[in-house]
C-alpha cells in the first residue's frame, strides 16, 4: 500500500462511486436489467456472531480510536 494515498485507497478502487454518480436513469436501468439476467449465487453467508460466539471465519471490525488504543500491539503478548 502506498501511504501517500491513505488507508482508504483500496476501498476507492473497489467502489468507484464517482464513475456511477452521474448515470442517466436509462443507463442505470440497463445495468439493473443486465444484473437480473445473471444466475443467482447460492451460498450461505456466515453469521451473525454474538459476544459468546467464536467465528470460524476471518472477520474485520472497525474500532474507534479509544478502543483500538487498548489493544495489544501486533505480536505483543496480551495484557494480563
Image (cartoon, rainbow, N blue to C red):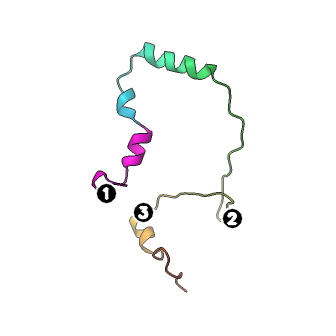
Which quarter of the rendering shows the N terminus?
bottom left
Q: In the picture shown, does residue 36 fall above or below 70?
A: above
Q: Which residue is at 47% across, 58% downward? A: 62
Part of the protein shown in magenta: 1-15
- Which residue is at the front of the view, 64 or 35? 35
Q: CA distance from mark 2 to mark 3?
A: 22 Å
In percent of the image, x 48 and y 73: which residue is there?
74
Q: Residue furthest left?
A: 4
Q: Is residue 13 left or right of residue 32?
A: left
Q: In the picture shown, does residue 2 fall above or below 72?
A: above
Q: Which residue is mark 1?
A: 3
Secondary structure under tag 3 reads: loop
Disc 2 residue crowd, few under 14, some 14–19, many 20+, Cα 10 Å: few
Q: Quadrant of residue 2?
A: bottom left
Left or right: where 74 falls relative to 44? left
Mark 2 or mark 3: name the one nearer the start of the chain. Answer: 2
At a point 35% along the width and 23% down the height, the residue shown is 22
Q: Which residue corresponds to mark 3? A: 64
Residue 32 placement (x, y as % from top left): 54, 20
**Relative vertical location of residue 51 with respect to residue 18 in this rendering, above or below:** below
Q: Position of residue 80 (x, y in %)?
A: 55, 86
Whether residues under marks 1 and 2 lie with C-beta atoms below 8 angstroms apart, the answer is no
- The answer to whether the residues at label 2 and label 3 have Cβ atoms under 8 Å apart is no
Residue 9 point in image, percent of width and height: 36, 48
Q: CA distance from mark 1 to mark 2?
A: 33 Å
Measured as percent of width and height from the top left, residue 51 is found at 64, 64
Q: Could you tell which of marks 1 and 2 lies nearer the N-terminus?
A: 1
Q: Which residue is mark 2?
A: 54
Taking depth in this image into account, of 70 and 40 the one nearest to the observer is: 40
Amino acid at each position: 500500500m502506498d501511504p501517500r494515498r491513505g488507508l482508504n485507497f483500496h476501498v476507492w478502487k473497489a467502489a468507484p462511486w464517482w464513475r456511477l454518480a452521474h448515470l442517466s436513469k436509462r443507463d442505470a436501468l440497463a445495468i439493473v436489467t443486465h444484473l437480473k439476467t445473471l444466475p443467482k449465487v447460492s451460498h450461505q453467508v456466515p453469521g451473525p456472531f454474538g459476544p459468546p460466539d467464536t467465528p470460524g471465519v476471518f472477520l474485520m471490525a472497525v474500532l474507534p480510536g479509544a478502543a483500538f488504543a487498548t489493544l495489544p500491539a501486533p505480536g505483543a503478548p496480551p495484557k494480563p
